[in-house]
Image (cartoon, rainbow, N blue to C red):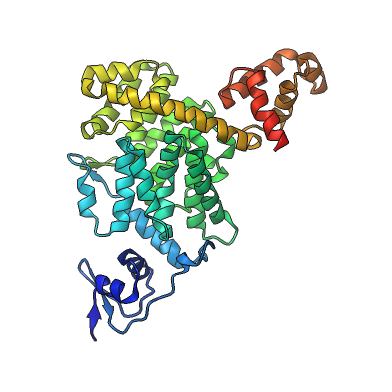
Amino acid sequence: MDYITVGEAAKKWGVSGRSITYHLKAGRIPGAVKKGKLWLIPSNAERPSDKRRCGNALPEPSSSLSADMSYVSASAARLMPAHNPNAILNSLEEDRLRLICEAELSYLRGDFVRVMYCFDQTTGDEAVRLRTCPIAIAAAISRGDYHTYAKIDIYLKRYRTAGTDSEIRAAAELALAAAAVSMVAPNMVHDWLKAGDFSALPSQERPNALYLRAKYFYSIGQFDTVLAVAQTALTLSSQEQGVTMTDIYLHITCAVACCALKRKEEAKHWLLSAMRLALPHGFITPFAELVSEFGGMVEVCLEQEFPDYRNAVILQWRNTVKNWISFHNQFTKDNITLILSLRESQLALLVARHVPYAEIAKQHCISVGRLKNIMLEIYEKLHISGRDELAQYIIIGEKA
């Protein structure tokens, strides 16, 4: 039998090599064989139909997409060489997998424009696009780009239908959880992530799921649990011969938890460990995101061991914190009823309408002191300071 290469098949069928590789991995080209790193395709093979490109319709849930998602997750989860993380790009055989790693490297270095470019290149490759959604969401938040986030949100929610394969649905929900915990909206996190039931996820994704679960516990103030979950995740993720993006963030999560628990020396230890993993390679974003959380500790550690990166981290923090606030305000307006419980929403609406506290307390059979405490919790959830700001979210949300 005569065979042709992927490049020859791409030219013959008028499609991209990446598209053909997708079909090969899914077993949709009969007679194709792999010799080492090279795919060989029967010269008389017919071009398979591509369900991914049928207009804007959601691809039909199938075992092939689930299998491709598992393959992509396993391939993209490999370690970045500790001495040179960029070397991972040369170690990957397929351009589609390089897009995932390039997006992560770009994000860590604060190049959010490049992240979105990589994400745009995944159009039509559902497995890679799903895998890249969390980093694209993070970049959209850092840029204050709510419009792009909203489009990704819609895309992901299409995979949450009852007929979708459990692994694909879990991948979509994991990406959505990344936005929820970043916006401190614990009520929007799915129950399986709260409970730690990762049975639908491939093993390579579980350290990242544990990281998001730790962030969920942080958002509800369970700092001891945050530390326990993050340390458990590190035992599953960390490897001596390399590093992953999740490793860096887990070290920082341990530091944040220790800081919240008033264990300053432990917090500093974890923070410096994260910096030693990240900053020699220019990975400034994880620290720029959390400057405020550490109350000056980031600056102290930078001056102590990485003074050359201090200005870059602080500059990015100043830029992204403004974008985060802008993004958070729009996110809150759109999701107010999910961020607050039903009772909190009812109380907040009355307070926003300037109903006297005594009257609200009487209606709901609570003391005025208890009402004030509940409102303080609501203000903290929404990152606002009082009822005048509250009206911008509650009243607008009610009219919508």
Quarter of the image with the N terminus is bottom left
Q: On the rendered image, what quadrant is the C terminus found in?
A: top right
Above or below, 92 against 135 in this view is below
The residue located at (68%, 32%) in the rendering is 396
The image shows residue 99 at horizontal and vertical percentages of 32, 52
Judged left or right of residue 59, residue 283 is left
- The reply to whether residue 236 is visible in this rendering is no
User: Where 150 sits versus 166, above or below?
Assistant: above
**Residue pushed farthest bottom?**
1
Task: Residue at 54% x, 63% y: name it.
Answer: 57
**Residue 27, quarter of picture:** bottom left
Q: Which of 26 and 258 is in front in this view?
A: 26
* Left or right: 69 as drawn, with respect to 191: left
Q: Is residue 60 visible?
A: yes
Q: Viewer-proximal residue, 167 or 392?
A: 392
Question: How many numbered circles are shown?
Answer: 0
Which quadrant of the figure has residue 375?
top right
In the picture, measured across the screen, residue 90 lies left or right of residue 300, that is left
In the rendered image, the vertical position of residue 271 relative to residue 35, given as above or below: above
Residue 322 position in % (x across, y down): 45, 26
Decide which of 186, 42 is in the foreground and name it. Answer: 42
